[in-house]
Image: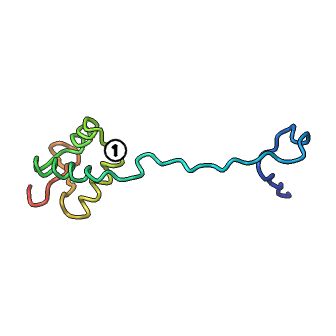
Amino acid sequence: MRKRKRSQGSVDITSFFSPEPPPERPKEPEPKPGGAPQPDVESRVAELIISRGRVRKSAIYQWSKEAGVPPAALYRALVSLERRGVVRRVFDEEAEELVYVAVGRR
């Protein structure tokens, strides 16, 4: 089978009436929501975990909803804190869910 040639752009059915093609408008890049990291989210999450010692994952997500922190920003903050060694993620058998523990506390 032969491959079809793809037409370059869309053509209006009445385009044969005008001798020149209509000018194309350049697309403006749309800003991505949440693209810029929120600098204080990481410090607020660290402060929450350190002040309580250990916090369940569900409690952190509930806190983030109430504080208006987007889930993606919360996740980035938690991953960053884990990589830097400020908090550690542990499975708590009593609560049957993940718990974030401040390093140096148990």
Q: Residue 72, percent across and down? A: 36, 48
> Can the viewer see residue 19?
yes
Residue under the point 78% across and 53% down: 8
Foreground of the two, 96 or 42: 42
Is residue 72 toward the left or the right of residue 84 in the image? right
Q: Residue 13, percent across and down? A: 86, 38
Residue under the point 29% across and 38% down: 68
Q: Residue 17, percent across and down? A: 91, 39
> Can the viewer see residue 91?
no
Foreground of the two, 9 or 62: 9
Residue under the point 21% across and 53% down: 43
Q: Residue 100, percent across and down? A: 19, 51
Residue linked to disc 1 = 71
The figure's colour scheme reads rainbow
> How many circles with numbers are drawn on the protein?
1
Residue at the top extreme of this rendering: 66
Around disc 1, counting alpha carbons within 10 Å, would you say few (fewer than 14), some (14 to 19), or many (20 or more)? Answer: few
Q: The residue under label 1 is which amino acid type?
A: Pro
Foreground of the two, 55 or 26: 26
Is residue 105 toward the left or the right of residue 75 in the image? left
Image quadrant where one finds the C terminus: bottom left
